Amino acid sequence: MTFSEINLFGVYVAPISVMMVATWVVLIALRKVAARFGLFRYVWHPALFVFSVYVILLSAFVLFLAR
């Protein structure tokens, strides 16, 4: 499948930018759940962990939509 530009209020944006924003919203929810249960205590570097989860989610999202 090929991705095409998305018309957003008259401005054409790349589809990856929309996917990045959607992934960021999902990541915010996951971060709140992890903070609520204290899961960041078990992580060596929380910022690096959150970034890694973001990259994994974005990759999965792109692969799911490209299928």
Image: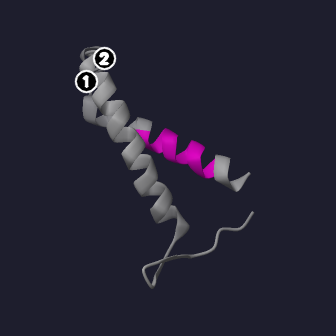
Colouring of the image: one colour
- Residue 58, disc: none
Residue 41 found in image quarter:
top left
Please name the residue shown 30% across and 17% down the image: 39
Q: With respect to residue 21, does 27 lie above or below?
A: above
Measured as percent of width and height from the top left, residue 9 is found at: 42, 80
Q: Residues within 10 Å of mark 2 (few under 14, many from 20)?
A: few
SS class, disc 1: helix
SS class, disc 2: helix
Instruction: Please provide the residue range marked out in magenta.
Output: 54-63
- Amino acid type for the residue under numbered disc 1: Ala
Given contact means CB atoms under 8 Å apart, are the residues at marks 1 and 2 in contact?
A: yes
Identify the residue position indicated by label 2 in the image: 39
Secondary structure predominantly adopted by residues drawn in magenta? helix
Is residue 61 within the magenta segment?
A: yes
Q: How many marks?
A: 2
Measured as percent of width and height from the top left, residue 17 is found at: 45, 64
Q: Residues within 10 Å of mark 1 (few under 14, many from 20)?
A: few
Q: With respect to residue 27, does 32 lie above or below?
A: above
Q: With respect to residue 12, does 55 lie above or below?
A: above
Q: Nearer the viewer, residue 16 or 48?
A: 16
Q: CA distance from mark 1 to mark 2?
A: 6 Å
Residue 16 seen from this side: yes
Is residue 62 within the magenta segment?
A: yes
Please name the residue shown 46% across and 44% down the image: 55
Residue 36 found in image quarter:
top left
Please name the residue shown 51% across and 63% down the image: 16
- Amino acid type for the residue under numbered disc 2: Leu
Identify the residue position indicated by label 1 in the image: 35
Please name the residue shown 43% across and 35% down the image: 53
